[in-house]
């Protein structure tokens, strides 16, 4: 029987195995463009953290069950464009 720590470690292992840095960097650039902010700004970093949390959720991490709602809300409140949302969706298909 898996403990919570085992489940979390398995989620991190899966996430790390599937992580694509080039696609992640592209998402950062798209998001920065949509937000009209520097890639290193806190607003872009907040969005990228939500994307990472969503990928962890899809990898089985139990702490991020409802992160999809936060990511969707962030996108809606910040006028993230449809092409960027499509790129986020494509990135999530990795996980």
Image: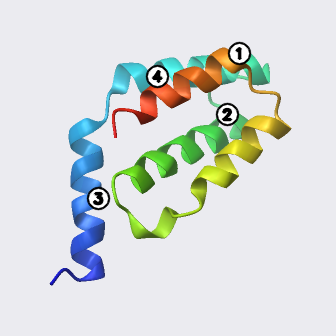
**Residue 42, quarter of the rendered image:** top right
Q: Is residue 60 above or below residue 42?
A: below
Tag in front: 4 or 3: 3
Local crowd at mark 3 within 10 Å, few (<14), some, or many (≥20)?
Answer: many
Q: Residue at x 59, y 62 (%)?
A: 66
**Residue 2, quarter of the rendered image:** bottom left
* Residue topped by disc 1: 33
Q: Position of residue 54 (x, y in %)?
A: 50, 48
Q: Is residue 52 above or below residue 82?
A: below
Q: Which disc is residue 25 wearing?
A: 4
**Residue 85, quarter of the rendered image:** top right
Picture mark count: 4
SS assignment at label 4: helix
Q: Which disc is residue 44 wearing?
A: 2
Q: Are marks 3 and 1 in contact (CB under 8 Å)?
A: no
Front-lying residue, 26 or 93: 93
Q: Are marks 4 and 3 in contact (CB under 8 Å)?
A: no
User: What is the quadrant of the N terminus in the image?
Assistant: bottom left
Q: Which disc is residue 11 wearing?
A: 3
Cα separation, mark 3 vs mark 1, equals: 30 Å
């Amino acid at each position: 029987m898996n403990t919570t720590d085992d489940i979390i470690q398995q989620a991190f292992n899966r996430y790390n195995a599937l992580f694509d840095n080039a696609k992640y960097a592209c998402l950062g650039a798209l998001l920065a463009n949509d937000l009209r902010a520097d890639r290193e700004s806190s607003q872009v970093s907040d969005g990228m953290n939500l994307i990472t949390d969503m990928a962890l959720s899809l990898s089985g991490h139990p702490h991020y069950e409802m992160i999809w709602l936060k990511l969707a809300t962030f996108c809606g409140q910040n006028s993230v464009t449809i092409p960027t949302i499509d790129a986020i969706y494509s990135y999530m298909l990795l996980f």
